[in-house]
Image (cartoon, grey):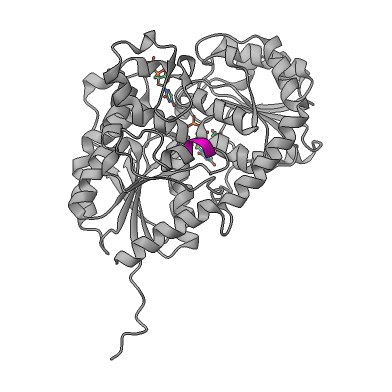
Amino acid sequence: MSNSHAQPLLPHIALFPCAGMGHLTPFLRLASMLSSSQNCLLTLITASPAVSAAESTHISLFLSQHPKVNHLEFHLIPSDPTTITIPDPFFLQWQSTNHSLHLLYPSLASASPPLSAIFSDFVVAPSMGTMAAQLNIPNYIFSPTSCKFFCLMAYLPNLLSNTSDICTLTQVEIPGLAPLPMTSILPPFRNPNHIFTSLILQSSRALSTAKAILMNTFHEFESDTLASINDGTALHNINLPPILPIGPLKDLDIKNDHQDKYYLSWLDNQPKESVVYVSFGSRTAMSDSQIRELSKGLETSGYRFLWVLKTSKVDKDDIQEVSDMVGESFMERTKNKGIVLKAWVSQQDILEHPAIGGFVNHCGWNSVMEAAREGIPVLAWPQHGDQSVNAEIVEKAGLGIWERKWGWGLEGLVSAEEIRNKIVELMEHEKVRSCSKKVGEEARKASGIDGRSEKVVKEIMQSLMQKR
Ligand code: UDP
Ligand code: UDP
Ligand code: UDP
């Protein structure tokens, strides 16, 4: 019998995000894109138990609405009680994931049909690289930050070994890239023993085992960095695989009908581009004193606002009432002007809404890419991690403004008056508004049909198809 009509075997890809919504969200977006538009089988690996309620909710909603995606729940070895003192539960989970990873090999090796590739988080790069080599399949690292910050992470082993005390530097010079001021280097990178730094160092040393690095960015947004990396000018002394921009990833097509999205109905009644949206992502807690200054700054700016508040890193610990945080009288005075809420919101629906005119944000990279897709001007207020590097990219791309002297949000107190002035500047800055719209057009073009980012994903899928 002729087998000329036999279906080609589809590639089977395992996706492994690490803890934190900033990591899970882009992986789910990638999974959603691959399952809807590409011919492949997918297995989503999730570490269990998840740290936050937001992660558990999104994993279940995603799986129930993508029944073809297999789920591999990976039970972590409980943390060593001596490490429980690590103040950040997400970093603790990254460490436990790395300690448990050897247990994952049998499940990967027995996957049916056999795996064709792994798309794994940067945090698990060392073990994933080794396991992929044993399985004789490529490991693609997917890193949910900016290309510029990724370069800093890749360069970190060299930086720390070449410099006796990085605190004495005034700037960090990554070969082939514009120097980064020391003020943009997150404080933990000054300490090789900090858990965040030690995890990044391990992953950076294992980069050469990856087939390529996929990034949720797009060419026009980070053109200088991407060009210098891929033509070999930047980081020429490091054995770095190609960096492939596949962003900005599209919205996640999952629905949560249980959630009351009254804030969207409220936005429906506000004039076009009149509302300031304020949010600092999924894991940034703000101090009580900073919340008070922000509330006064918002009120005196005179603009309408939608403000999502958080006072703890992990959502399950957020138990304070909104009125206790901002005060009953603020709520009363501003009831016709704005909404303050303390819950998970659908940020993608908010940023898409025509009433939104500006975004006060910490510059978590997912938020930056979401603002870029919608062409919404950002007031960058970095709090930690990659966010100062990201803020600089936002400013340079014309997507927003950044007040450098505010420093790291968590370290000082920014006054109500300064906040008010910057909000007014954000909302009235015609040049930034028109530039942001242009960024939005470029962003949608990059990830649209035949856009540069879309083509990269197609090429990867074709190469995996040919190997089957
Ligand atoms: N997010 C959301 N609703 C919230 C808080 C966050 O939809 O109430 C989403 C946001 O749109 C983004 C992700 O969670 O996709 C947060 O990632 P980001 O990189 O912006 O910041 P992080 O939370 O990692 O600091
Ligand atoms: N949650 C989420 N996405 C949603 C709805 C909820 O991630 O679309 C998470 C969120 O972290 C929240 C938790 O699940 O804290 C419980 O959500 P729910 O809306 O049921 O309760 P609420 O936040 O109003 O207490
Ligand atoms: N951090 C980060 N990404 C995040 C949150 C924090 O890189 O999403 C960095 C940040 O610079 C912070 C450090 O990790 O200062 C550790 O945070 P934490 O407050 O848990 O510990 P500490 O700074 O007290 O050691």
Number of numbered labels in the structure image: 0
Q: Is residue 461 left or right of residue 2?
A: right
Q: Position of residue 309 (x, y in %)?
A: 59, 24
Question: Which of 231 and 61 lies nearest the eye of the viewer?
Answer: 231
Q: Is residue 321 above or below residue 359?
A: above
Which residues, given as a range, are shown in magenta? 222-226
50 inside magenta stretch:
no
**What residue is shown at x 20% (from left), y 58% (from top)?**
110
Image coords of residue 356 (percent x, y): 72, 35
Residue 66 in view (yes/no) = no
Q: Measuring from the top left, give residue 294's x and y in whole percent.
A: 65, 16
Residue 394 visible within the image? yes
Residue 223 located within the stretch drawn in magenta: yes
**Image quadrant where one finds the C terminus:** bottom left
As drawn, which residue projects farthest toward the right?
A: 271
**Identity of the residue drawn at 34% across and 24% down:** 196
The percent position of residue 281, horizontal first and vertical second, equals 53, 30
Q: Dividing the picture into quarters, in which one does residue 195 lie? A: top left
- Residue 50 placement: quadrant: top left
Determine the residue positioned at 48% across, 21% down. Answer: 312
Q: Nearer the viewer, residue 452 or 359?
A: 452
Give the quadrant of the N terminus. bottom left
Dominant SS of magenta comes to: helix
Q: Is residue 4 above or below residue 464?
A: below
Q: Residue at x 54, y 20 (%)?
A: 320
Q: Quadrant of residue 349?
A: top right
